Image (cartoon, rainbow, N blue to C red):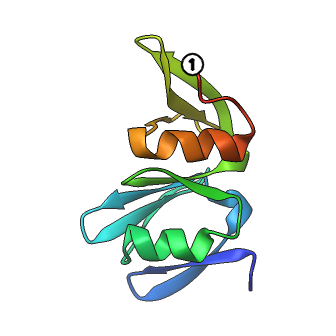
């Protein structure tokens, strides 16, 4: 079951295909798993989720956001600096300063704005 992310919700575990996961956002003691159809709360830490998904097409772009790189549609600038990712569902996610260089390297682009 390498191609699924098990999301523990109230009373059940839902096996979400990794390709359906757009992003994962931190929400207090939970993470919010975003798919095209829904948002599910899963009790886990961002660090555990990041470690679990590190070999897949996911990258941490902020201390509270992990994105599926296959769902990144644009990188836009704010105040002249490339700082926002636009995802396939239209959400905009801020790129954290300390994650910027590693993200751009993984995408194969220059980090110069």
User: Which of 57 and 36 lies nearest the eye of the viewer?
Assistant: 57
Q: Residues within 10 Å of mark 1 (few under 14, many from 20)?
A: few
Position of 4 compared to 59: left or right? right
User: Is residue 71 something one can see in this rendering?
Assistant: no
User: Which of 39 and 92 lies nearest the eye of the viewer?
Assistant: 92
Number of numbered discs on residues: 1
Q: Is residue 100 above or below residue 64?
A: above
Q: Residue at x 61, y 70 (%)?
A: 53
Element assignment for label 1 = loop
Locate residue 73, reporting x and y percent: 68, 32
Q: Residue at x 52, y 56 (%)?
A: 38
Tell me which corner region of the image, top left, top right, bottom left or bottom right, holds residue 45: bottom left
The N terminus lies in quadrant: bottom right
Locate residue 112, reporting x and y percent: 59, 22
Tell me which corner region of the image, top left, top right, bottom left or bottom right, holds residue 108: top right
The C terminus lies in quadrant: top right
Q: Which residue is under mark 1?
A: 113
């Amino acid at each position: 079951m390498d191609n699924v992310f098990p999301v523990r919700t109230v009373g059940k575990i839902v096996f979400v295909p990794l390709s359906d996961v757009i992003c994962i956002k931190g929400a207090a003691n939970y993470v919010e798993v975003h798919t095209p159809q829904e948002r599910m709360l899963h009790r886990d830490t961002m660090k555990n989720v990041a470690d679990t998904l590190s070999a897949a097409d996911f990258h941490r772009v902020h201390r509270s956001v992990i994105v599926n790189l296959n769902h990144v549609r644009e990188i836009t600038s704010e105040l002249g600096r490339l700082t926002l990712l636009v995802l396939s569902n239209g959400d905009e996610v801020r790129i954290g300063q300390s994650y910027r260089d590693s993200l751009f390297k993984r995408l194969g682009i220059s980090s110069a704005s």
